[in-house]
Amino acid sequence: MNIVKQSAFFSVIVLLVSALLIPSPLFADFVNGGSSENTTPLRQPDLRHEPIQPLMQPEGLDPHKVNLGERLFHDLRLGRDNDMACSSCHNIKDNGADHHAHAPGRDGTTLDVNTLTVFNSSLNHRQFWNGHARNLEEQIDAVVNNAKEFATTWPTIINKLKQDKDYVLSFTKLYPKGITADNIRNAIATFERSLITINSPFDRFLLGDANAISPEAKAGYRLFKTYGCVACHQGRNVGGNLFVKLGVFKDYFAVRGNPTPVDLGRFNVTGKEHDRHVFRVPSLRLAALTPPYFHDGSVATLAEAVSIMAEHQLGRTIPGQDILHIVTFLKSLPGEYRGKQLGRTP
């Protein structure tokens, strides 16, 4: 499918989805505080079938493996020179990422793309911006082998961990084969699968608390749907479940200038022309906490990101007041981790 046809096809999909998702009069009255012509008491609408659904606490995870994975996640010995851990780029106490356009790498380098949050990452259908890892275990492999990150090998890591009696004991109790690459990957991935940000204000709203979010956030959610943003950002993770070309209606890279190899996106994985400039749609669950934005980290504010996405992906110009409402809605999406609200929205 050539670019023109692809753009036309995507625009049709956006319009169809937008039409299907336009809220009912009941929801519109609810958002706007009730119709002046309707004296019926205001009721919470049925939100069970909304395109965005609430996050729930993950079940079935072995708590001992979660604890072991957390130790490994923060262990600097996984890096070549005992100087880099998963948490070096993914700050669990903040937003599960960092606030750099590109995270600092090894030996004075920087990583090629903006760091994605590790929170809720288990809900993504692929890992990394270009989706080159099929799951969390493959993502961990890629970091271990990356010359700008851990820059090491599994045998080296295994030898280090076997010198630690606590690790030997923990692995022996949990895994019949003890410390192996597969088991290290499994423990870290199990911890990462526990990083679900539950109980956000918007999720409480979806679950029936009509006062969990402000009227402005409710209006922002309505606009998020009617403008078509929800065509790509939906599901429990508000994205992360499909690949889309960056620049459907306008050439993002021509406008930004200074193209780099990573701008090719999924083309770098498949070598297929139709994957040029295609990226995995990011989750917006923690978007309010993870500036700067986009794979290149080039956009500083959430309002600017919304405006650019509308122009390039939807072919639309969104008025400033509507953008503010959408941003207010996005600020209602971050939830809690271990009972504490994540980060601070600007």
Image (cartoon, rainbow, N blue to C red):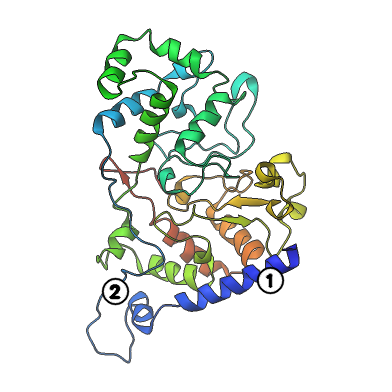
Marks 1, 2: nearer the viewer: 1
Please state the horizontal and vertical placement of residue 67, each as a whole percent of the image.
29, 28
* Foreground pick, 113 / 56: 56
Please state the horizontal and vertical placement of residue 62, each as a whole percent of the image.
26, 34
Residue found 52% across the figure and 38% down from its top: 99
Q: Is residue 284 above or below residue 51?
A: above
- Secondary structure found at label 2: loop
Please state the horizontal and vertical placement of residue 208, each as a whole percent of the image.
25, 66
The CA distance from mark 1 to mark 2 is: 33 Å
Query: Residue 346, can we see it?
Result: no
Q: Which residue is mark 2?
A: 46
Residue projecting furthest to the left: 41
Q: Residues within 10 Å of mark 1 (few under 14, many from 20)?
A: few
Q: Are marks 1 and 2 in contact (CB under 8 Å)?
A: no
Q: Residues within 10 Å of mark 2 (few under 14, many from 20)?
A: few
* Foreground pick, 126 / 106: 126
Q: Quadrant of residue 8?
A: bottom right
In the image, what residue type sits under mark 2?
Asp
Residue found 61% across the figure and 39% down from its top: 113
Q: Is residue 251 above or below residue 39?
A: above
Left or right: 280 as drawn, with respect to 256: left
- Secondary structure found at label 1: helix
Q: Quadrant of residue 111?
A: top right
In the image, what residue type sits under mark 1?
Ala
Left or right: 273 as drawn, with respect to 241: right
Residue found 42% across the figure and 71% down from its top: 219
Q: Which residue is mark 1?
A: 8
Please state the horizontal and vertical placement of residue 81, each as a whole percent of the image.
53, 13
Label placed on residue 244:
none
Q: Of callouts 1 and 2, which one flags the residue occurring earlier in the amino acid sequence?
A: 1
Residue projecting furthest to the bottom: 37
